[in-house]
Image (tube, rainbow, N blue to C red):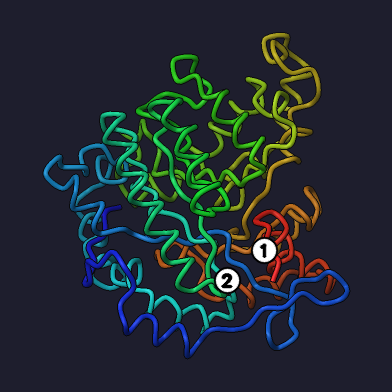
C-alpha cells in the first residue's frame, strides 16, 4: 500500500535527533554473552517493521506505481476507503522517526531492524531506474542507522529484476553502508524467485557468502482476482504468496545449494509453516515432488526463520515446538494495522514458554542473525 508522508525530508530533522537523544538506550553485552539493554534486560529487537521513503516515492510518482501493486489492483471500494484512512492515521509513522521512537519506547522495543515499505522494491521499473531507487532507499536507511545507532539496524532492497545489478547493490549496501541484509518480495513481475529467466541463484549465493538476512515480505498475491473483497489479498494473499515462494525455494533446491542462507518468513511463516506435513507426504508419495531435493521438504523449512505475527498464543506455541525457539523472532509489522501493537505481551501469553526461550524470541535470535553486538 502506498503511504504519503507529512515530512518529505531525506536527512534527519533536528526534532528527530532531539527525540533520539531523549529516548536512546545504551546497550551492552553481558558476561554471559546475552545482549542486554541499559536496564539489564535481554535485548528486544523487532525484525519486522517498515520505513517509507517519500523522496524515492516522489521520483516515480509520475509512473503511477499503484497500477503495479497487487494490494491496490485487487481491492474493492471499501478496502480502498479503509486504506485511505490508514494512510491518514498511520502514514506519518512510516517516515517520521520522532513518532517511531516514541512508539518503540511504548512497545518496549530497543532496536528495530527497519526495512523498506514492501512496495518500495520497485521491481516493475526499468533495471537501471530500479538500481537507482534501491540506492536511494538504502542510503536513507543507512543514514537513519548512523544517526540513531542504538535504536536501529537496517535491511535494504535490491533490484531483483536484474540479478547483476541486484548482486552489486547487495554487496554495496552491506559492505559500504553497513546494512544487515535485504528485504525481497516473493515474486518479481509475476515470476517466481526460482524462475530461470531471473537467474537469482547468483543473488542467493551472494547473500549466503555475505552472511546476511534475506527478509521475504509479500505485497499481496499477484493473481488476486478472487481476493478483492474483505481485504482478502492481504488477509489471505500475503500468507499465500509467502507459502508459494518458500515452497519454490525448497523444492527447486535453493536451500539445498545454499544451506547457510538466512531466510526470514514474515507473518508467522505464511501457511506453509503450519501445514508442512502435506508437502512431506507429497515428497514421499510422488516422484514429481522429488525431482530436485532428496530430503523431506520440512527439513529445509526448519532452516528458515519466522516472526511472531501469529495473533494466537497457541499457534505461536506450535511454531516454537515445531521449529525451536531459536528460529522464532519478534515482529510487529510496524506501523500497519495488520501488525501487533503489544509484541512483548503477546509473547508472554504463550503457554509454557521458558525464560531463556522468551529472551531468544524477544531479541536474542535477531541479535545473532543481524550481528548486533553492543
What residue is drawn where x is 23% and y is 57%? 55
Q: Quadrant of residue 129?
A: top left
Give x and y (percent) for residue 18.
39, 87
Figure quadrant of residue 160: top left
* Residue in the image at 69% along x and 74% along y: 43
Tell me: residue 98, above or below residue 273. below
Residue at 72%, 78% in the rendered image: 28
Q: Position of residue 343 (x, y in %)?
A: 59, 72
Residue at the extreme right: 32
Q: Position of residue 170 (x, y in %)?
A: 50, 40
Q: Nearer the viewer, mark 2 or mark 1?
A: 1
Please state if 159 lies on the left or on the right of 114 as rendered. Answer: left
Quadrant where the C terminus is found in the figure = bottom right
According to the image, label 2 marks what residue?
111
| Label 2 or label 1, whichever comes before in sequence order | 2
> Of residues 106 and 228, which is closer to you in this image?
106
Dot 1: element = loop
* Towards the viewer: 230 or 136: 136
Numbered circle sitting on residue 372: 1
**Dots 2 and 1: beta carbons under 8 Å?**
yes
Horizontal side of 86 relative to 344 (left or right) equals left
Residue furthest front as drawn? 176
Distance, label 2 to label 1, CA atoms, is 10 Å
Residue 88, percent from left and from top: 23, 70
- Crowding at mark 2 (Cα within 10 Å: few <14, some 14-19, many 20+): many
Q: Is residue 131 above or below residue 309?
A: above
Is 277 drawn above or below residue 316 in the view shown? above
Amino acid at each position: 500500500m502506498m503511504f504519503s508522508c507529512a515530512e518529505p525530508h531525506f536527512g534527519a530533522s533536528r526534532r528527530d535527533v532531539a527525540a533520539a537523544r531523549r529516548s536512546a538506550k545504551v546497550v551492552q553485552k553481558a558476561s554471559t554473552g546475552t545482549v542486554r539493554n541499559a536496564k539489564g534486560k535481554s535485548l528486544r529487537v523487532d525484525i519486522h517493521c517498515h520505513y517509507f521513503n517519500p523522496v524515492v516515492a516522489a521520483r516515480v510518482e509520475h509512473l503511477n506505481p499503484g497500477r503495479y501493486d497487487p494490494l491496490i489492483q485487487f481491492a474493492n471500494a471499501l478496502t480502498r476507503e479503509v486504506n485511505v484512512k490508514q494512510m491518514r492515521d498511520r502514514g506519518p509513522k512510516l517516515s517520521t522517526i520522532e513518532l517511531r521512537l516514541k512508539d518503540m519506547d511504548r512497545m518496549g522495543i530497543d532496536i528495530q531492524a527497519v526495512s523498506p515499505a514492501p512496495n518500495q522494491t520497485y521491481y516493475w521499473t526499468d533495471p537501471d531506474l530500479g538500481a537507482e531507487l534501491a540506492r536511494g532507499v538504502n542510503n536513507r536507511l543507512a543514514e537513519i542507522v548512523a544517526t540513531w545507532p542504538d535504536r536501529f539496524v537496517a535491511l535494504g532492497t535490491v533490484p531483483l529484476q536484474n540479478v547483476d545489478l541486484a548482486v552489486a547493490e547487495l554487496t554495496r549496501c552491506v559492505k559500504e553502508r553497513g546494512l544487515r541484509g535485504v528485504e525481497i518480495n516473493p515474486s518479481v513481475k509475476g515470476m517466481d524467485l526460482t524462475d530461470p529467466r531471473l537467474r537469482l541463484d547468483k543473488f542467493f549465493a551472494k547473500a549466503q557468502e555475505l552472511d546476511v538476512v534475506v527478509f521475504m515480505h509479500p505485497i499481496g498475491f499477484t493473481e488476486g482476482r478472487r481476493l478483492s473483497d474483505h481485504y482478502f489479498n492481504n488477509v489471505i494473499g500475503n500468507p499465500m504468496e509467502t507459502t508459494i515462494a518458500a515452497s519454490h525455494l525448497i523444492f527447486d533446491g535453493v536451500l539445498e545449494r545454499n544451506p547457510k542462507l538466512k531466510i526470514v518468513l514474515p507473518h508467522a511463516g505464511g501457511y506453509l509453516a503450519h501445514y508442512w506435513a502435506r508437502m512431506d507426504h507429497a515428497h514421499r508419495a510422488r516422484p514429481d515432488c522429488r525431482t530436485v531435493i532428496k530430503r523431506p521438504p520440512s527439513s529445509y523449512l526448519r532452516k528458515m526463520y519466522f516472526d511472531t505475527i501469529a495473533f494466537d498464543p497457541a499457534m505461536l506455541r506450535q511454531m516454537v515446538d515445531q521449529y525451536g525457539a531459536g528460529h522464532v523472532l519478534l515482529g510487529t509489522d510496524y506501523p500497519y494495522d495488520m501488525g501487533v501493537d503489544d509484541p512483548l505481551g503477546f509473547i508472554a501469553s504463550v503457554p509454557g514458554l521458558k525464560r531463556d526461550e522468551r529472551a531468544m524470541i524477544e531479541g536474542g535470535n535477531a541479535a545473532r542473525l543481524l550481528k548486533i553486538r553492543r
